[in-house]
């Protein structure tokens, strides 16, 4: 397997680059690796939801949208 170690400006290892064909082989061999990619998607979804919440908060601050009770927010979580 050909991997490349990624280093910061001080020479400290900060990551590893694995060619995609090697990554695909590893995912077939170790199912939990494929699941890790799915977790990244959920992180992206979380970031999008936070972005939407901030937009809504700004609209509340401008008086364009009525604020919801905190319990409604907690129920969503």
Image (cartoon, grey):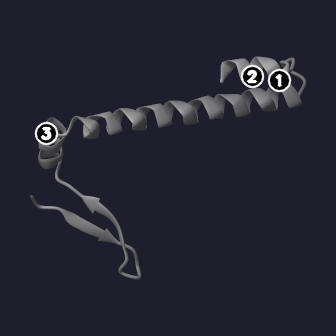
9 versus 51 height, above or below: below
* Among the two numbered marks 1 and 3 on one chain, the one whose residue lies closer to the N terminus: 3
Q: Residues within 10 Å of mark 1 (few under 14, many from 20)?
A: few
The residue under the point 80% across, 19% down is 71
Quick one: label 2, few (<14), some, or many (20+) residues within 10 Å?
A: few
Q: Position of residue 45 (x, y in %)?
A: 51, 30
74 and 68: which one is in front?
Answer: 74
Would you say 67 lies left or right of 46 here? right
The quarter of the displayed image where residue 62 is located: top right
Foreground mark, 1 or 3, reads 3
The residue identified by callout 1 is 70
Task: Determine the secondary structure under disc 2.
Answer: helix
Q: Which residue is mark 2?
A: 73
Contact, CB < 8 Å: mark 1 with mark 2?
Answer: yes
Q: Mark 3 sits on what residue?
A: 29
Report the number of numbered marks.
3
Q: Secondary structure at mark 3?
A: helix
Kind of element beneath mark 1: helix
Task: Using the numbered discs, state the Cα–Cα distance from disc 1 to disc 3 in whole angstroms.
Answer: 45 Å
Please provide percent x and percent y for residue 56: 75, 26
Q: Are marks 2 and 3 in contact (CB under 8 Å)?
A: no
Q: Measuring 64% from the left and 34% from the top, which residue is drawn there?
A: 51
Please tell me in which quadrant of the rendered image residue 29 appears: top left
Q: CA distance from mark 2 to mark 3?
A: 41 Å
35 to the left or right of 68: left
Badge nearest the viewer, 2 or 3: 3
Residue at 60 percent across and 29 percent down: it is 49
Residue 56 located left or right of residue 51: right
- Extreme residue in the bottom direction: 10
């Amino acid at each position: 397997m050909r991997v490349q170690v990624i280093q910061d400006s001080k020479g400290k290892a900060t990551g590893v680059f694995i060619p995609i064909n090697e990554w695909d082989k590893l995912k077939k061999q170790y199912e939990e690796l494929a699941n890790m990619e799915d977790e990244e998607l959920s992180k992206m979804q979380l970031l999008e939801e936070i972005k939407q919440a901030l937009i809504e908060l700004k609209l509340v601050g401008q008086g364009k949208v009525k604020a919801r009770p905190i319990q409604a927010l907690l129920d969503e979580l």
